[in-house]
Amino acid sequence: MKKDRDNFSSNLGAIMAAVGSAVGLGNIWRFSYITGINGGGAFLLTYLICVVLIGVSVMIAELSIGRKTKLSPVSAFLSVAPKTPWWITGLLATLAPFLILLYYPVVSGWAIGYIKLSIFNWSEIKSDSAQVFTDFTAGTSSIVFSIIALLLTTGVLLFGVSKGIERISKVLLPLLGVALIILVIRALTLPNAFDGLKFLFYPDFSKITMTSFLDALGHSFYSLSLGMGIIITYASYMKKEDNLIKTSLSIISLDTIIAVLAGMAIFPAVFSFGLEPTQGAGLAFITLPSAFAMMPLGQLFSIIFFFLLFIAALTSMISIMQVPVAFLEDQFKLKKKTSLISVGIVSVILGLPAALSFSSLADFKIFGLTYFDFLDRVANNFILPITALLTILFIIFKFGINESIKEFLIGSNKEKSILTSMYKVAIVSIAPIAIILIMLHSIGLF
Ligand code: TRP
């Protein structure tokens, strides 16, 4: 079963590719809008708690499973626990990215569209950004842009892991960092920027609810690309000499820093112009452009922002698409091209209603949510935490905690670090208990 697989050329390459996957629409578009809805600082704090207590250990768990088995998720679970239902975990881990792939290109397409709108239709954005958003998402051009985003992703994946993903992440990530810092400086130099910082960093504890906890938990998995086989898949391409501890801490800290910086770019701008942070999914596309429209050189900053959003989206989308593609290759022995084309076509067809969720299908509801929100909620607040929980149980009962510790210590120069004991405590108690409690609450049992 173990065929010769393409490896990353260096640990840095592997880290960059994983960071490229982690840093995406989640850090900029999704983080800012759910932070806005959930009251700012209190949500940021809850989110950070989830990242430190749960994210770190699940990240290490996935890295060790992936590198040890050198297989994609379903095959990895099958090879460690043959003839048991554990492969279902791998299947769920493949399903989440597939569901996300149905709406991620839509938002990525908006980012491309908004680069164009910022250049050519700036006066319309200036006069009514909400109307521009409605018209744009209702028109065919938003669908065309989504398909372009998907085609670009397919193109990169055709070049393979080390050449495609690694190379593009190495070039695009530093660019993203620079663009983000420019935006933060712009935002912080606006009048009353402090109000936005206060909103983001000052926790109002009355805003913490079980629902915001579930949002924070789901978002921590989403943002770190956990619970969906991504990290298992990437780790399967890493080498034994690679330091998994360093890798996990680098991915997690970079991902978190970028989300916080995005918040520091967005909220001061929103507050400076007296706008509301509670817009929801439209925060980055309606509220923020309104803020740009009111600031000096706003058009330029709008172009930079949407370019940044698109770069972040592209490197993540590559990793999202990689999972179902690797699944078809490994399980059905399909050629890479065939798998890519099949996944591409299916996601265009099933993704179409997501693109229309803001216009002609706005009234089509599943459990009270539009198709777009339904995909987002089911994948992030249910499948990701459940898969993460199953992965933890798999480590405890099948793979072995010690086996996983042994794997992540290979390539790390420290014999045993504090991380080993933290990992043990987190994986057998904190992480599973927290996930179970939050899930029980969300289905109304608790
Ligand atoms: N982490 C990415 C973000 O923050 C999203 C992402 C990348 C993702 N790969 C994924 C989400 C796989 C689900 C599945 O935007």
Image: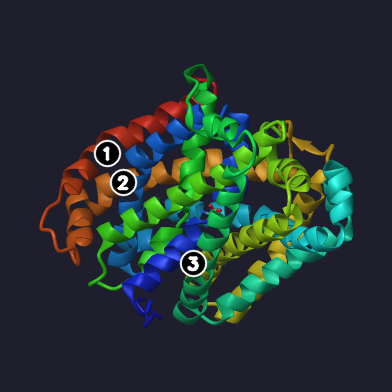
Residue 13, compared with residue 188, is above or below; it is below
Q: Are marks 3 and 1 in contact (CB under 8 Å)?
A: no
Q: Amino acid under label 2? A: Ser
User: Judging from the image, what secondary structure is the residue with disc 3 in?
Assistant: helix
- List x then y, in percent, for residue 121: 87, 58
Q: Going by the image, does 38 lie left or right of 385?
A: right
| Mark 1 secondary-structure assignment | helix
Characterize the local packing of mark 2: few (<14), some (14-19) or many (20 or more) Cα atoms within 10 angstroms: many
Kind of residue sitting beneath label 3: Pro
> Is label 3 or label 1 in front?
3
Residue depicted at 26% across the width and 69% down the height = 242
From the viewer's perspective, is residue 255 above or below residue 440?
Answer: below
Question: Badge 1 local density, few (<14 within 10 Å), some, or many (20+)?
Answer: many
Mark number displayed over residue 39: none
Residue located beneath label 3 in the image? 174
Q: Which residue is mark 1?
A: 426
Question: Identity of the amino acid at label 1?
Answer: Ala
Q: Earlier in the sequence, mark 3 or mark 1?
A: 3
Q: CA distance from mark 3 to mark 1?
A: 33 Å
Helix, strand or loop for disc 2:
helix
